[in-house]
Image: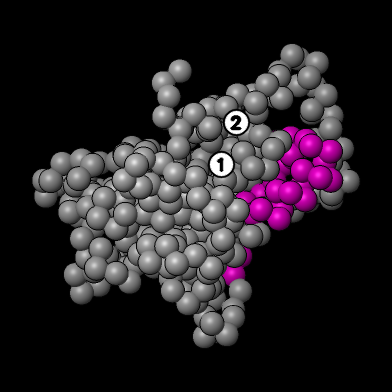
Amino acid sequence: MIKGLAITPPVIGRISIGHLVQKKDKWVPEKDDAFTLTTQVQNKDGWLLHPLHQQLAEVSPNNKIRTIPVRLLFNDSELNLRAEFSAFDRQTGRPLCVGNGECAKRVSGEGIEDVPCPTPERCQYAQEKGCKLYGRLNVQVEGQNDELGTFMFRTTGYNSVRTLAARLQYFEAVSGGNTRHLPLLLKLRAKSTTQSYRAPVFYVDLTLRDDDTLAEAVCFARSEALRFEQAGVEIAKLEAMAKSLLRNGQFEDEADEIPLMLAEFYPDSEVASAIPEASSTAAHTSKTQVRSARLTNRLGSRSELAPTGGDQHEQQLNH
């Protein structure tokens, strides 16, 4: 195994609820009121929509996808949702410091150091570097033809991370550790707060299917878990391997995922106007790449971004 490379769950598509728009030579995040499912392939017009996007849109009111039937790949909540406090270099997009509220790994002149992580509100380094909550959720969309592949939903929104983390922990507990067999629904919700000036703030939730009760869903999950066990599918070993592969590297995000990240993390800074230049560092510097980068943001940018001011204008931008 090559060391220093974090091996993440296989991704066959992305889920987003936001995009970036250009305003006065700057790219700024703008929220959507529906999900978008894209492939990992892009052309001159941007990320290609996943075939499942059209299927879901056709059965959704006004063709707006606000619920997605999903399953999970793992029983372990921390494998399904990996949330960290993260700070990035505003010029290169490389991770500078990643922590969990107790300890962190920080890049220094001597390499990678282990340092305390008192959370961004209590960390001078975090405030200087713009450290934020950053979550990655892996789900399997009903109808996909890859049993070990996942769709990735990325978010820097506090509401989504907190809600998803709570739901996953609850489902893991009530199902007796059989979360991966629960039929679930990824749902887009909205709420208003004083900080959002009464405007709707969109975030993502994870619930049971509309026609299922908790008892029915748990009963089904337990029967499915037994069926998989009798078939010889080693879920415990799958999770042990997934944890080992994630620990294989210092940071999860790799170079090909860095383009367009800066403006999503730091929308109010000078890097917001340099997205085309920033994106070209990981690809080519041609005009075609710049146009592609712009449209990429519109179709598949990273999800839920909460600019300075907490939940005010909390938005989803998926890479």
| Residue lying at 44% horizontally and 44% vertically, measured from the top left | 113
SS for tag 2? helix
Query: Are discs 2 and 1 less than 8 Å apart at CB?
Result: no
Crowd tier of the residue under label 1, counting other residues whose Cα lies within 10 Å: few below 14, some 14–19, many 20 or above: many
Whether 181 is among the magenta residues is: yes
Please, is residue 100 above or below residue 138 in the view?
A: below
Q: Residue at x 41, y 29 (%)?
A: 4
For marks 2 and 1, the one nearer the N-term is 1
Q: Residues within 10 Å of mark 2 (few under 14, many from 20)?
A: some
Q: Is residue 59 among the parts visible in the rendering?
A: no
Going by the numbered disc 2, the residue's amino acid type is: Lys
* Residue closer to the observer: 298 or 246: 246
Residue 126: name its quadrant. bottom left
Disc 1 target residue: 138
**Between tags 2 and 1, which lies in front?**
2
Residue of label 2: 243
Q: Quadrant of the N terminus?
A: top left
**Label 1 sits on what residue type?**
Asn
- Relative height, residue 27 to residue 223 (above, below): below
> Is 36 inside the magenta-drawn segment?
no
Image position, residue 264 (x, y; %): 37, 60
- Percent across and percent down for residue 43 are 25, 41
Up the image or down, 104 lies above or below 13; here it is below
Residue furthest front in the image: 110
Tell me where residue 139 sits by quadrant: top right
281 vs 180, left or right, is left
Question: For this rendering, which residue is in front, 184 or 107?
Answer: 107
Q: Is residue 256 left or right of residue 192?
A: left
Q: Nearer the viewer, residue 245 or 302?
A: 245
Q: Is residue 266 left or right of residue 227?
A: left
Magenta span:
164-190
